[in-house]
Amino acid sequence: MPTLYYAPGACSLAPHIVLEWIGAPYEAVRVRHGSEELLAVNPAGAVPTLREDDGWLLTQCAAILDYLAEKHPEARLSGGDTPRARAEAHRWSAFLTSDVHAAFWPVFMPFRYTTDEGEAARRAVVEAGHKLVAKQFDLLNRHLDGREHVLDGGRSVIDAYAFPMSRWARKMLPGGLGPYPHVQALHDRLEVDPAVQAVLAREAGK
Ligand SMILES: N[C@@H](CCC(=O)N[C@@H](CS)C(=O)NCC(=O)O)C(=O)O
């Protein structure tokens, strides 16, 4: 049975949702950033980390999502098997796990982006981060116009990753998801999914 190390609301929410969609037994272990427990499985001190029964550890959300989709073809979460479908899955995985995720860092962790400890410098970094996030969400919003899922092959692990990113944007951007109605629509469809509801409740400790 695989074990997922997660932190509530973090990008680890994506593989958590995917494991629930797959429906096979798994264990979800809540960890604190910087804890010995997390550092023991991921020296970067980041979530998500996946551990298989034989002790094999996998980090990097994109790799974990791709692995889970490949391991469980019956769940049909890869977005398709043709060379172009695989390329599209990798394209959108790279966009979301690098461009979009990284754009949030100045918003969440402004102190990592300036050595100036003043409030004005902190605010300037956060505002620059907002602009970067907005640029990425504009791209995602335009892609989702007329689409129900990120990938044309239907529901996939990429939708699962888009969900925590959308939640972050809704919470952190001054206008929330208002300017991105197609992203908002995807978020809303996913939010009412029973598996997503179950995972959100677990992560909230309910
Ligand atoms: N590139 C990594 C990034 C993982 C990552 O940064 N996770 C965040 C939570 S969303 C984290 O654990 N951050 C802890 C830290 O940076 O100290 C991945 O996609 O798995």
Image (spheres, grey):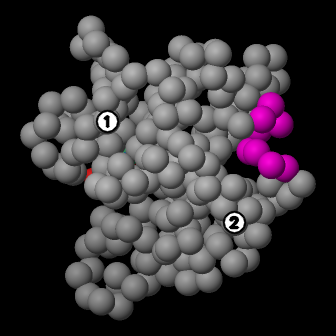
- State the quadrant of the N terminus: top left
| Label 1 Cα neighbours within 10 Å, binned few <14 / some 14-19 / many ≥20 | some
Label 1, label 2: how far apart the Cα atoms are: 27 Å
Instruction: Determine if the C-beta at disc 1 is less than 8 A from ligand 1.
Output: no
Part of the protein shown in magenta: 147-154
Name the foreground residue: 77 vs 39: 77
Pointer 2: what residue?
184
Outermost residue toward the top in this view: 54
Q: Position of residue 38 (x, y in %)?
A: 19, 38
User: As shown in the figure, which amino acid type bears the numbered disc 2?
Assistant: Gln
Q: Is residue 183 left or right of residue 98?
A: right
**Disc ID at residue 108:** none
Closer to the N terminus: mark 1 or mark 2? 1
Task: List the residue tagged with mark 1.
Answer: 28
Q: Amino acid at mark 1?
A: Ala
Residue 11 placement, left or right of 159: left
Q: Residue furthest bottom?
A: 120
Q: Quadrant of residue 124?
A: bottom left
The reply to whether residue 97 is visible in this rendering is no
In the image, residue 52 lies in the stretch drawn in magenta: no
Is residue 120 toward the left or the right of residue 139 in the image? left
In the rendered structure, the answer to whether residue 39 lies left or right of residue 173 reads left
Element at label 1: strand
Q: Nearer the viewer, residue 199 or 52?
A: 199
Q: Nearer the viewer, mark 1 or mark 2?
A: 1
Question: Which residue is depicted at the point 46% across and 47% down?
Answer: 198
The residue shown at (89%, 54%) is: 146
What secondary structure do most residues of the magenta stretch adopt? loop
Q: Residue at x 56, y 83 (%)?
A: 174
